[in-house]
Image (tube, grey):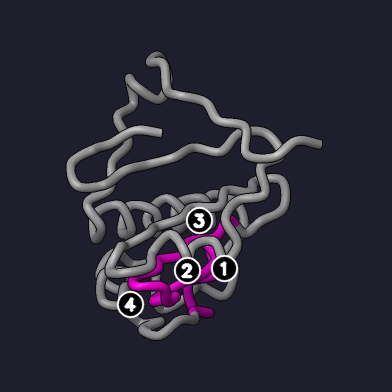
Amino acid sequence: MGRVGDWSFAIEYGDAVGPTSTGLGAVSAMGVEAVNFSLSPWHPPSMFAYYHDGDCICSFGIGEEARRWGKSPDLLVPALTEMGVLPAQLDLRGADAERVRRLSVLVIEEHFRLQLPRADVLDGELPMFIVREA
């Protein structure tokens, strides 16, 4: 856990199940914004979700941006289109798929002004919490 600018962040490790939609709804209650990346390179797609005031505003799979949901599913469409992610490619395998995924994440980072402090995450000491036991 840490803080960068106006954002606080948490990193899950190992077999962490990630916040469910109910969890993100609770975290974002009473006007709070929550952005979640659920990275799953072993079972794509990785997922993005943005919650505000308890509601899912926008969510989609990274690399599957044409299929979106939430109260404002098109929130990032102008930026995704400008960056060349949308309209969606029909064949997103190989190098093009990786390029599209990187561009999509860049759009999300820029829109929400997100940037984890690389040195703190890689070399720093972040607090650790056990939230469940096997």
Mostly what secondary structure, the magenta segment?
A: strand
Instruction: Check the image and report above or below for 67 versus 44.
Output: below
Point out the tag, 4 or 1, that comes first from the N-terminus.
1
Q: From the image, tell me which residue sits under label 2.
A: 25
Amino acid at pointer 2 = Gly
Of the residues tagged 3 and 1, which is closer to the observer? 1
Q: Quadrant of the C terminus?
A: top right
Point out the tag, 2 or 3, that comes first from the N-terminus.
2
Amino acid at pointer 3 = Asp
How far across and how far down the image is residue 60, in percent? 50, 70
Amino acid at pointer 4 = Val
Instruction: Check the image and report above or below for 28 versus 3.
Output: below
Q: From the image, tell me which residue sits under label 1.
A: 22
Image mark for residue 96: 3
- Given the current orientation, which residue lies at the most extreme right position? 134
Instruction: Check the image and report above or below for 92 versus 87.
Output: above
